[in-house]
Amino acid sequence: MAASDDYRIDRGVVRRNGRRHAAATASHDAVVREVAARMDERLDYIRLAPRRILDLGCGTGADRARLQARYRDSHVVGADACEALLAPVRRRGLIGRLLGNRPPVVAADAIALPFPRSSFGMVWSNLMLQWLDDPAPALAEVHRVLETDGMVMFSTLGPDSLQELRQAFPEHSVHRFIDMHDIGDALLRAGFGDPVMDMQMLTVTYAEIDTLLAELRGSGSANARTDRPRGLIGTRAWQARLARLEAGRHDAVLPITLELVFGHAWKQAPKADEQGRPVIRFHPAKP
C-alpha cells in the first residue's frame, strides 16, 4: 500500500528513539493525551462491553486508566514495541503481580502479536499506526486477536500533518503519512466490516522553535525514515531551515498542523473457514 521510499520507516530507529527518550516521554505527550480524549468521546456512541482490551502501542500506559475507568470490569493489556517505555507501567503493576494478577503490559511487535486468536473484545490504538510504513500487516494481526463482533478503534496522522516542517526542511527530513481512505481499504482487506473513518485538523502552537524541537525529540518523534539525511549539517544550512520555519509565525506563535485520522471497525463472523470452505450458520426458529 505504501511501497515508495517516502513512506518507509526504520523501525529499529523508532525503537531506539523511544528508548533514548523514554524517561521524558510523559512530559511531552500533550498531543497524545488530547487525541486520546477525542477517541474516548467516540466511545460514548458505541455499545460495547469487552472482557479484555488490548492497548496497542501503549507507550507509558497513560491510556490504560482512561480505558479502565470506562470499562471497569475489563482487563486492559498494554503492548508496545519499545521495552523501555513500558517500565513505568510495570512498576505500577508490581503489587498486582505479587498478588498473582496477570501482567498489565508486554513488549510486542504490532505485526506479530504474542496473543492467541480471539483474545480481545476490543483493540485500542492511539497514534501508533503512523510509525508503520504499511499498516496492513498490523491490522491483520488486530483482526486475528479480536473476538468475533469485537472492535478496533484507532487514531493516526494523515498526509497534511507537519506541513510547516515539510516546507521548511529538506526533502526526506519529515515523515509522510498515509491517506485515510487507504487505511479504510486496508481495514476491509484485513476482513473488518463497517469501517468508519473521519478526520479532524488540529493546530498546535509554539512560542519558540526550540520548544517545538524539544517536544519532537523528547517524545521520541525524531525522523525515522529509511531515506533520512545522514551526517551533520553546517550552521548556515541549519539556520536557513530555522528561518524558513520562523517565516510561518502568525500572531507571535508558530503553528504546526496535525491531520488527525480516527477510525473504528468490527470483526464480523467469518464467511469461510481456514480451508476456504463456506461457513453456514443455522439459527433456531423463534417460538
Image (tube, helix red, strand yellow):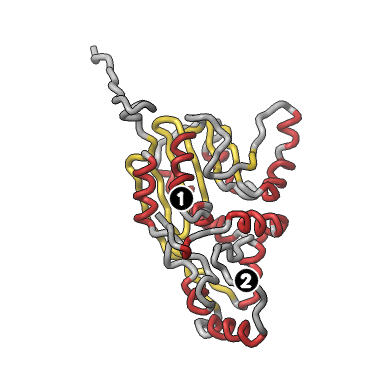
Work out whether residue 36 can be spotted. Answer: no
> Tag 2's secondary structure?
loop
What x and y, as percent, mark residue 270?
A: 35, 30
Residue 230: mark in rendering: 2
Q: Which residue does the image show at 72% across and 31% down from the upper left?
A: 97
- Residue at point 57%, 39% (across, down): 68
Is 115 displayed left or right of 4 in the figure? right
Residue that mark 1 sits on: 135
Q: Nearer the viewer, residue 233 or 55?
A: 233
Q: Secondary structure at mark 1?
A: loop
In the picture, residue 192 is in which quadrant?
top left
Residue 63 in view in this figure:
yes
Query: Between marks 2 and 1, how big is the CA–CA gap?
Result: 26 Å
Q: With respect to residue 153, does 282 lie above or below?
A: above
What amino acid is labelled 2 in the image? Arg
Residue 260: x and y in percent read 45, 60
Q: From the top left corner, tell me how far across and down residue 1 is, in percent.
A: 40, 54
Disc 2 + disc 1, Cβ < 8 Å? no
**Image location (x, y in percent) of residue 44:** 43, 44
Which of pointers 2 and 1 lies earlier in the amino acid sequence? 1
| Placement of 58 over or under 254, stated as above or below | above
Quadrant (top left/top right/bottom left/bottom right) for the C terminus = top left
> Vertical placement of 251 versus 116: above or below?
below
Callout 1: few (<14), some (14-19), or many (20+) C-alpha neighbours within 10 Å? many
Please tell me which residue is depicted at 53% across the width and 52% down the height of the picture.
128
Look at label 1 and name its amino acid.
Pro
Left or right relative to 53: residue 104: right
